[in-house]
Image (spheres, rainbow, N blue to C red):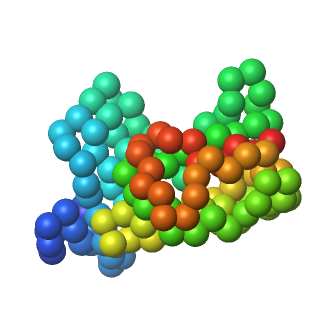
Amino acid sequence: MATVTQIGSGVFRVDDEGRQAVVYVAGAAGDMWAFCDGVIYRERERGEQRMSGTAKARRGDPASYQMAAPMPATVVRVLVSTGQSVRKGDTLVLLEAMKMELPIRAPADAVVKAINCREGELVQPDMTLVDLA
């Protein structure tokens, strides 16, 4: 059975069968984010849960993706350019939130169709940062 210990404001240590992980939690009731091992999880009031950093398929085109901001954050670096080919797992944009770096990675091999953010910009949750095809 896992044991959860709060070690700071919004910071928890999870011990499970000899393994430890640090989980950062932010947001308000009904719209919470958790960050653990490089993955951001978001749960909304409707019970909808989603892993951020994965892409939303663009309506009508399953080979296209919109990479969205998982939480309010600042764009630290844009690591790709329009027309560039990327491979699954490549970091496209590096965000910073709650003093953590949050890499937004390509979900599949693709080509960058548009970049919708710039370095230093404050972005809001679900804002599309990069379009891939």
Instruction: Work out which quarter of the rendered image holds the N terminus and state it.
Output: bottom left
Instruction: Work out which quarter of the rendered image holds the C terminus and state it.
Output: top right
In this rendering, does residue 107 appear at all? yes
Seen in the picture, residue 105 relative to 124 is either above or below; the reply is: below
- Say left or right for 10 vs 82: left
Near-viewer residue (70 or 22) = 70
- Say left or right for 103 vs 106: left
In this rendering, does residue 37 appear at all? no
Count every numbered label the image shows and give the total. Answer: 0
Q: Looking at the image, which residue is at 28% across and 39% down?
A: 31
Seen in the picture, residue 111 relative to 16 is either above or below; the reply is: above
Q: Position of residue 83 (x, y in %)?
A: 85, 53
Q: Position of residue 93 (x, y in %)?
A: 60, 62
Q: Looking at the image, which residue is at 31% across and 66% down?
A: 98
Q: Looking at the image, which residue is at 42% across and 43% down?
A: 125
Q: Quadrant of residue 59?
A: top right
Q: Position of residue 73 (x, y in %)?
A: 40, 57
Near-viewer residue (60 or 46) = 60
- Say left or right for 42 vs 133: left
